[in-house]
Image (cartoon, rainbow, N blue to C red):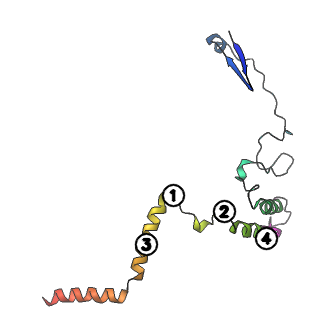
Amino acid sequence: MTTVRQEGKDKIIFVTKEDHATPSNAELVEEDPDDPYEERGLILPSGEINWSCPCLGGMASGPCGTEFKEAFSCFHYSKEELKGSECLDQFRAMQECMQLYPELYPQEENKIPEANAEQTSEDATASDSKATSDPVQDSNSSQASSGSSLEN
């Protein structure tokens, strides 16, 4: 026999083996397309931008959220043949804002994968030490060492 217990906001339902043996008679409720709390994609059925979409990764609410919204809105609603071509000023403003927060919006050339970060710094150190040595002196010393071995 199924039992139901309410604990605060939670409803706990205990079912028996017999309850699972019979097909469910639960009725599915049709989703409300106008429910503002229902997760949707980036573009709502009305054609508006869903600023709370997790696909935006917080861009719309960060320190450059206003600039991001202006640039993305301009692009989304663009009617130009080359979509978004009239939005350069908005995208420039967004980029300038993002450059003020490099810890939140790292540039592509600044991104180093965590696994390769140590190896990359070791490679850079090794190449720096090679670059700082004098190639002429190195070639002279190798010639001298090879020349001395020839003389013997």
The magenta span reads 76-90
Question: Foreground: 19 or 128?
Answer: 128
The magenta stretch spans residue 141:
no
The Cα atoms of the two marked residues, 3 and 4, are separated by 39 Å
Q: Secondary structure at mark 2?
A: loop
Q: Amino acid at mark 4?
A: Leu
Q: Amino acid at mark 1?
A: Glu
Q: Which residue is mark 3?
A: 125
Q: Position of residue 54 (x, y in %)?
A: 72, 48
* Nearer to us: label 4 or label 2: 2
The Cα atoms of the two marked residues, 4 and 1, are separated by 33 Å
Q: Earlier in the sequence, mark 3 or mark 2?
A: 2
- When the figure is inspected, residue 133 is found, relative to residue 62, above or below; the finding is below
Q: Position of residue 62 (x, y in %)?
A: 73, 57
Q: Secondary structure at mark 1?
A: helix
Q: Which residue is mark 4?
A: 88
Q: Amino acid at mark 2?
A: Tyr
Q: Position of residue 25 (x, y in %)?
A: 75, 17
Mark 1 vs 2: CB contact within 8 A: no
* Nearer to us: label 3 or label 4: 3
Q: Residues within 10 Å of mark 4 (few under 14, many from 20)?
A: few
Q: Which residue is mark 1?
A: 114
**Which residue is at a point 77% across and 59% down the rendered structure image?**
65
Q: Earlier in the sequence, mark 3 or mark 4?
A: 4
Question: Foreground: 51 or 9?
Answer: 9
Q: Earlier in the sequence, mark 1 or mark 2?
A: 2
**Which residue is at a point 45% across and 71% down the rendered structure image?**
124
Q: Earlier in the sequence, mark 3 or mark 1?
A: 1
Q: Is the C terminus in the top left, top right, bottom left or bottom right quadrant?
A: bottom left
Q: Which residue is mark 2?
A: 105
**Which residue is at a point 81% across and 58% down the rendered structure image?**
76
